[in-house]
Image (spheres, helix red, strand yellow):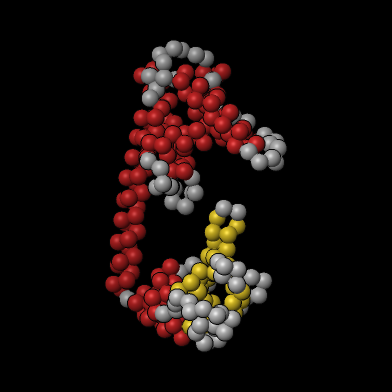
Amino acid sequence: MWPPPTSDLTMPESLTFAPTSDPRRVRAPDGRVLTVPDGWALLPPGDAGLTRRVKAAGPSWTVVEKVGRKLFSRGVWAPEAHILRARAVLEAERATPAYEKKLAAGRERRAREQEAYEVDFANAVLRFLAFSPAWLPHAKRMAVLVATHATPVGSGTVARTERIPLERRAEAAVIAWMRHQTTQYDDMRIARVKGARREVRRELADISRAVLDLHRRDVPHGPSACPLCTALART
């Protein structure tokens, strides 16, 4: 039945809801709790291609749960017939040699793009470091380490976001790497007070920038007393 009997208003075909404790009831943005229409089934998250087809086939309800600052999909409610039909068609397409060839081409393309991004990111790190010639080998070594850590797909690091320019991503990745490699951050006991961790990170970032500045001048210093030199030797 569309729209569901719990609704007093005409609703668009595709909507987004929050989950409730009842698996067949969802909460609308305005607070109303609606019952999933009869004949509908829940398509679990995980198959983007199937989800797109089910949504394109007709009405659907997307269930999204906010945990902290992140949103997690809990699936899509849609007419069961639409889900079964879309799944059957998609499975038939995926069984063809043409589809496998398309997948292989996609993997190769993504691998090339990833390799190019790793190089671009490492070069951006080098530009940010701007070490003097005497410390250039350290800069090259650090650029590789930071890029290797920060650029993998799915790593969730700042290097994977497109919301800020590449140069700022490189700077943030360097500071994050130094926080874990050249300070005692991982072993610190930080008070569970709002803003406390942010303040600690800000203080450590200032220290890290001062250490970086040492390597931007042709002034020798004892590597054994330098947290960055020690970290690079260790890794």
Q: Percent x, y for residue 84?
A: 45, 83
Q: Is residue 68 above or below residue 60?
A: above
Q: Position of residue 82 (x, y in %)?
A: 44, 83
Q: Is residue 22 above or below residue 198?
A: below
Q: Is residue 217 above or below residue 58?
A: above
Q: Residue at x 33, y 40 (%)?
A: 120
Residue 204 in the image, given as x and y percentages of width and height: 57, 29
Going 54% across and 29% down the picture, which residue do you hit? 205
Q: Please, which residue is most extreme toward the front here?
A: 8
Can the viewer see residue 234? no
Q: Quadrant of residue 66?
A: bottom right
Side (left or right) of 84 relative to 234: left
Tell me the residue at 49%/14% (across/down): 221
Instruction: Return the x and y of residue 29 as percentages of the image width and height.
Output: 55, 66
- Who is closer to the viewer here, 46 or 13? 13
Front residue of 98 and 53: 53
| Residue 215 picture quarter | top left
- In the image, 28: left or right of 53? right
Image quarter of residue 23? bottom right
Residue 52 seen in the figure: yes
The residue lying at 36 percent from left, 49 percent from top is: 114
Q: Nearer the viewer, residue 52 or 107?
A: 52
* 39 vs 185, nearest the viewer: 39
